[in-house]
Image: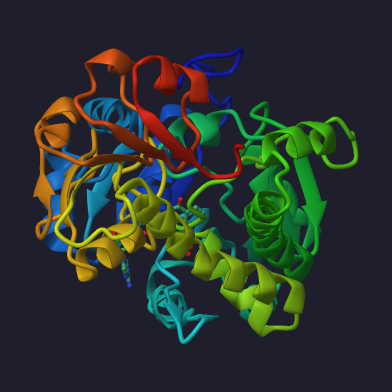
Amino acid sequence: MSIGEGPIGDSFSAVSRRITVIGLGHVGLTTAACFAHLGHEVWGVDSSSSHVDRVSGGHVDFFEEGLPKLVAEGLANGRLHVSTQHGRAAPEFVFVCTPTPSIDGRLDATITADAISHLRPFIDEATIIVVKSTVPVGFTVALGPRAVSNPEYLRAGTGPYDFLHPERIVIGATDADAGDAVAGLYDGLGPVVRTDPSSSELAKLAANSFLAIKVSFINELTQVAEAHEADTFEVARILGMDRRIGPAFLTPGPGWGGPCLPKDSGELAAIGMSLVGAAREVNHAQPQRVVAKVAEACGGSVAGRKIAVWGIAFKPGSEDLLESPAMRVVRVLRAAGAQVCAYDRLATHPDLDMAASPLAACHGADVLLVFDDQPVETEHIPVRAVVDAVNSRPVDEWRRAGLRVFGLGRR
Ligand SMILES: NC(=O)c1ccc[n+]([C@@H]2O[C@H](COP(=O)([O-])OP(=O)(O)OC[C@H]3O[C@@H](n4cnc5c(N)ncnc54)[C@H](O)[C@@H]3O)[C@@H](O)[C@H]2O)c1
């Protein structure tokens, strides 16, 4: 996948706009670099001077495929500036991409509200404030009519591609002219959905929560299938053929994590959706089910056993360990006396024994635990048993290579 793939990847906007982006993390730096790529004049502001120094030198500390190239392009052609300070000329748009951490299960917008209140001296009455951060419902309306909700739907790790090839661009505005102006920035990129700010904010929480429910549904169904000697994959295949349900996100696994699903579902559960709360409980218990499979593969107990782990990030293709189901499993294994050696192509952890290659992680291991499959021939993997927590390979492939295989939901 390349960021320039598709008909619009290299197109440039007809009218160059002055855009400020506040918060240059996964979302903000992607937004800044992509708008610069589309021909706009972008001023990026971040409170961390060391981060700004590294970005000005062309270094991106986190993984978003294609982002370093876009940042380098913007810095070189002068359309992208990054600083700890705001620019002198009032921008036409300010995109707010600051953090909204989860505190006691609720979205906390304090940092974002403070960043917006500090903006006032640097903008004028014509400036449109665009809220990209995931915020509590009602946040944008409270900022007044010149504020527009435009939640970010990018998937962690593929930000630039998703920004330039969006499934939908949601613009929640009370002032129609402000909404039109924001929509104009995305001209030609993808379908624009116009709505009111609170519906836009709620839709963002609902999208991630719905995915969370779907994954928890199949994970809980897996327990029922295992108890009744049914095969979850057969059940999922039949479910997925129903056009009202669809086949995506119906594979059993170790549960969901990362920077968005836990946080967004926590907020929706807290403001009234008990169904989302139930999905969170199922997810909370899921790592224990993986641990039980590892214990079974070890003959009853993991104490004193060496477990090789492939993949520690919250999902393959990310370096983010936040709320990673794999790390939750690793912590339980270690607490139960197992020795863990891990390999991840992007992520690392200071307190874990990290191997330099997938095979090195398996050296001397009793069991291989897979969260992210690696391009290694099955017959070369030097273990006797595998717990394939993401069902990465057909069971027969593991078995043909002489491995005992323990999966989730397979008979
Ligand atoms: N990461 C994702 O995949 C994703 C996807 C959709 C939505 N979101 C939402 O977007 C928002 C930003 O998330 P992120 O992942 O980009 O965060 P991040 O932690 O990667 O980056 C946040 C950046 O903001 C900077 N910052 C903090 N306070 C600041 C301030 N007062 N002024 C200027 N800069 C400040 C930090 O130094 C950091 O560089 C959050 O609300 C998040 O929920 C994230």
Q: Tell me the quadrant of the picture where the C terminus can be found.
A: top right
Q: Position of residue 205 (x, y in %)?
A: 66, 64
Left-right relation of 195 to 379: right
Q: Residue furthest bottom?
A: 104
Q: Position of residue 94 (x, y in %)?
A: 48, 58
User: In the rendered image, which quarter is residue 369 located in?
Assistant: top left
Q: Residue at x 33, y 33 (%)?
A: 67
Q: Position of residue 84 (x, y in %)?
A: 21, 62
> 158 or 143, which is in the foreground?
158
Left-right relation of 170 to 255: right
Q: Residue at x 80, y 34 (%)?
A: 240
Q: Residue at x 11, y 39 (%)?
A: 57
Model colouring: rainbow
Left-right relation of 56 to 221: left
> 359 or 56, which is in the foreground?
359
Q: Residue furthest front?
A: 299
Q: Position of residue 362 (x, y in %)?
A: 17, 33
Q: Residue at x 80, y 64 (%)?
A: 196
